[in-house]
Amino acid sequence: MGKGTVTSWKYYNHAMIPNCAPHEVPDMKPVEDGSVWRGGGYFARWTTDFDCGEETGFWYCIKDDVFDIQSLKSKRRYEIVKGKRNFSCQRIEAEKYSSEIADILAEAAGQYPDKYRQDVDREAVLQMIPEWDRRYLVYGAFDEKGRLCGYAYLERYDSYSEFRVLKVYPACERKGINAALTACILEDYREVLEQGHYICDGTRPIQHETNFQDYI
């Protein structure tokens, strides 16, 4: 089936999924009347009994409490401390770093396994980046020379935020850049996390081979 749009549902990875937060109840009428399939997809996936209090075979990656580095295992603390020593992380205006972001994306994409790898259209990326500042909270990681080496962005809603993207130069990963960026975001979110806001970094991956969700 071809891709399309269905009110309150969207096409993603051959499936139709609801346009709502994990804790919200989706509008099931399109599934019940069959109109959901106008959007494409081979199946529909949605969540029920969110935060059920027990471990199941399917899960979301959620951060809903204040970040406390002392609560982490020593290996994770070390990664964050190392990352902060090597990189300075902060909120940025993406448009000011459009060229650098495009370079990072292209090099990061080049490290993906062949079946995940996508060609990066640099001009298309440069045209999209100004929209990021209107839609997302964008964070950057800079090395000691002031070079942007990685970025991440989140889309914020009233009750939660979606962690959309984190891309870095592959050579910087061993220096703790991912840990430094993630810690910076959680520290910046401290106040809203205290107020009941949460960050969602997606669901358990069942096909992807990077295991990044397990790491997060």
Image (cartoon, helix red, strand yellow):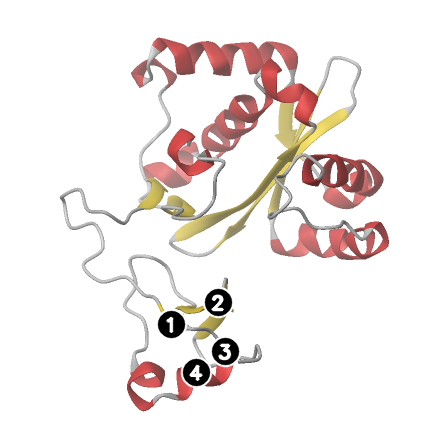
Observer-nearest of 210 and 200: 210
Residue pictured at 17% horizontal, 42% vertical = 55
| Disc 3 target residue | 40
Residue type, mark 1 in image: Phe
Q: Position of residue 37 (x, y in %)?
A: 43, 83
Q: Earlier in the sequence, mark 2 or mark 4?
A: 2
For the residues bearing labels 2 and 1, Cβ distance under 8 angstroms: yes
| Disc 2 target residue | 14
Separation of residues labelled 2 and 1 (CA atoms): 7 Å
133 left or right of 56 in image: right
| Disc 4 target residue | 37
Separation of residues labelled 2 and 4 (CA atoms): 11 Å
The quarter of the displayed image where residue 171 is located: top right
Asked which secondary structure carries label 1, the reply is strand
Q: Earlier in the sequence, mark 2 or mark 3?
A: 2
Using the image, tell me which numbered label, if any, was put on residue 43: 1
State the count of labels. Answer: 4
Residue type, mark 2 in image: His
For the residues bearing labels 3 and 4, Cβ distance under 8 angstroms: yes
Separation of residues labelled 2 and 3 (CA atoms): 7 Å
Separation of residues labelled 1 and 3 (CA atoms): 9 Å
The quarter of the displayed image where residue 150 is located: top right
For the residues bearing labels 2 and 3, Cβ distance under 8 angstroms: yes
Observer-nearest of 120 and 23: 120
67 left or right of 122 in image: left
